[in-house]
Amino acid sequence: MKLSLSGKKAVVGMIFIAPFVIGFVVFIAYGIFTTIRMSFSDVILAGATSGVELVWNNFDNYIQAFTVHPTFPEVFGTSILNMVIDVPLIIFFSLFMALLINQKFRGRTIVRAIFFLPVILGAPAISNALLSARAMMVGGVSPASAEVMASLGSNLNVDVNYYLAMLGDLAIPPTLIGYIVDAVHRINNIIIASGVQIVIFLAALQSIPPSVYEAAKIEGATPYETFWLITFPMVSPLILTNVVYTIIDSFAVSPVVTLSYSTIFSDYNYGLGSVFSLVSSLAVCLILVVVGLVLGKRSFYYT
Amino acid sequence: MNIKARIEQMKNDPTIASKRGQAERKLRAVVFALFRTALVLGISYVILSPLIGILASSFFSTEDSYNPVVYLIPQNPTLERYELTILRMDYWNVLGNMMIYVLGLTVIQLLICSMAGYGFARFNFPLKKLLFGCVIITIVLPSHTIMFPLYTTFQTFNPFGIFGLFNDGNSVNLLGSPWPVVIMTIFGVGLRSGLYIFIFNQFFRGLPREIEEAAFIDGAGSVRTYLQVMLPNATPAVVTVTIFSVVWQYNDNFLGRLFNVSDSILLSRRIGSLQATISNIDQIRDPSITTLYVYAGVVLMILPLLLIYVFMQKHLIEGIERSGIVG
């Protein structure tokens, strides 16, 4: 059989992507399909080496998840809510920090190295070990290190609430104040969750050609105008990337994932666990689509 | 002397006005620099302080940890925590195994993902858009959605009945070995493989076509063009993917736990059980003391990554800038 040049190229291209396509069909597509089937079935273990048997039971698992299960609706709700709260904080914080360390000052290299550290230290193994270590220390002799850890929390002797009430008198809505105070309390978590985002924003900022800034300066633009008319539009596509990354990343460690993991591997309730993971994944995908549509339209693409 | 007239004169004097403007700008710059320094220092402190705490207390002797006056600087520093931790974690062996495992996976991942990225970037074939959509799905899909099907697949591993031929028609249980992760990585669906395919795709699309045409005219086949021409030209993307892949594989807990990968390979699993091991075998019951061993273990686990990072740090930032993640 003779192939034209474009036909030959098509075959070569397919060979290049063949491993991925096989992997996608065998593992991902099959996995999604099986999870959907399990969520509609009673799953019975048919023996240690011969896999599982599925018996169709309509919407029983779904009904059980939302009406009978004691914690799922609540855990699901808080997971989504926490994500919605955290994502804007992380995005604002990482953009702000990227702007800050993009400037020229002494010791910039070291500061950048430090800001990337959370990515390296993000191992669940490390934080889990620390968490369990901390949990076991309650009530025992507390060594100095425990105090170092605790000092990250809020043990201020200043009556912060008094000053916050003053802000309330300035007609700033209390929910907004609560949101910001909460963010400051959890600054540690936010910093640790925004390592990759800072690096991505930093790269975006550095890819803006300096000639654009020079032109703006000659035209007499103020720094404020320069930021909103040049810097912000130029990094806006990366805001979408970062929002998507942040949503996925914060979802991977949310309580609903833990719940579905323990339902499957500790309670051996495979059908119910499949419902949990399927429903939560669907919710996240929905959020991603909405975010993509809203931000995608507003992003500026430099072509 | 009329003071009022003198003030008027000074107000209108252009040299004084420009001096005042300069001073104002300088003051503004200084205030801003102060603000920036304070902020950067504060946040660096938040990032570093747990590390400093862990590092310091991993050198504490038992008396130090019972002495409430000792803070950060131990009075009787000891290496005993490290000695026992290295022994109980079987540190050097496990670290060696883990390095082989992580670096092996990274090499496979680099090869497979760059191939797929190149295929998507430079060839036209039917269903290309749909298949690239599949890449996006693997990036976006939360990995726990398919964890149980993956678990059963590898528990009774028998693709197309191939393994049955050697094993009396029975499937093979691959759980507990590194094979599930290796197989998934070979087929381009390993840990964050989709992201790497995306990065390579963006990067190859940005390279000029003339390079390939020159190679083609010189008589190089597609595979040779890819291996000897395209891949060396994609160094920034390769560096970026290498660092992310090494760091994330090294820190991965999800796949390792799901497939129950043996703790003679994964340091992270060793750390998880370290406290129990030490309190059972060495009869050290006080949690405030066993914690110190966990701290030593955490330091030992972070150290290799930190070394890799320090050496590659400069390439990483440059690599990300040039690798096309940035639109």
Image (tube, rainbow, N blue to C red):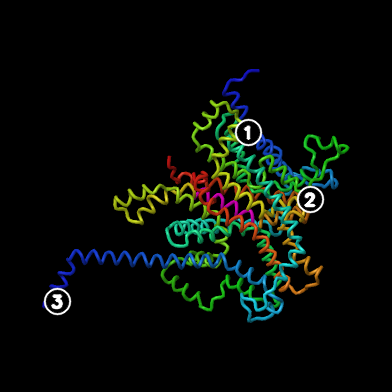
Q: Position of residue A47 (x, y in %)?
A: 85, 46
Q: CA distance from mark 2 to mark 3?
A: 92 Å
In which quadrant is the C terminus of chain A drawn?
A: top left
Residue at label 3? B3
As drawn, A174 above or below B269 = below
Left or right: where A276 falls relative to A99:
right
Residue flagged by tag 2: what amino acid is it? Gly
Identify which residue is drawn at 64% across, 60% down: B303
Residues at marks 1 and 2, common chain? no
Identify which residue is drawn at 36% across, 47% down: A211
Residue flagged by tag 3: what amino acid is it? Ile
As drawn, A182 above or below A241 = below
Residue at label 1? A16
Q: Mark number for residue B176?
A: 2
Identify which residue is drawn at 84% across, 43% down: A50
Q: Is residue B107 visible?
A: yes
Q: Chain of mark 2?
A: B
Q: Chain of mark 1?
A: A
Q: Are marks 1 and 2 in contact (CB under 8 Å)?
A: no
Q: Are marks 3 and 1 in contact (CB under 8 Å)?
A: no
Q: Residues within 10 Å of mark 1 (few under 14, many from 20)?
A: many
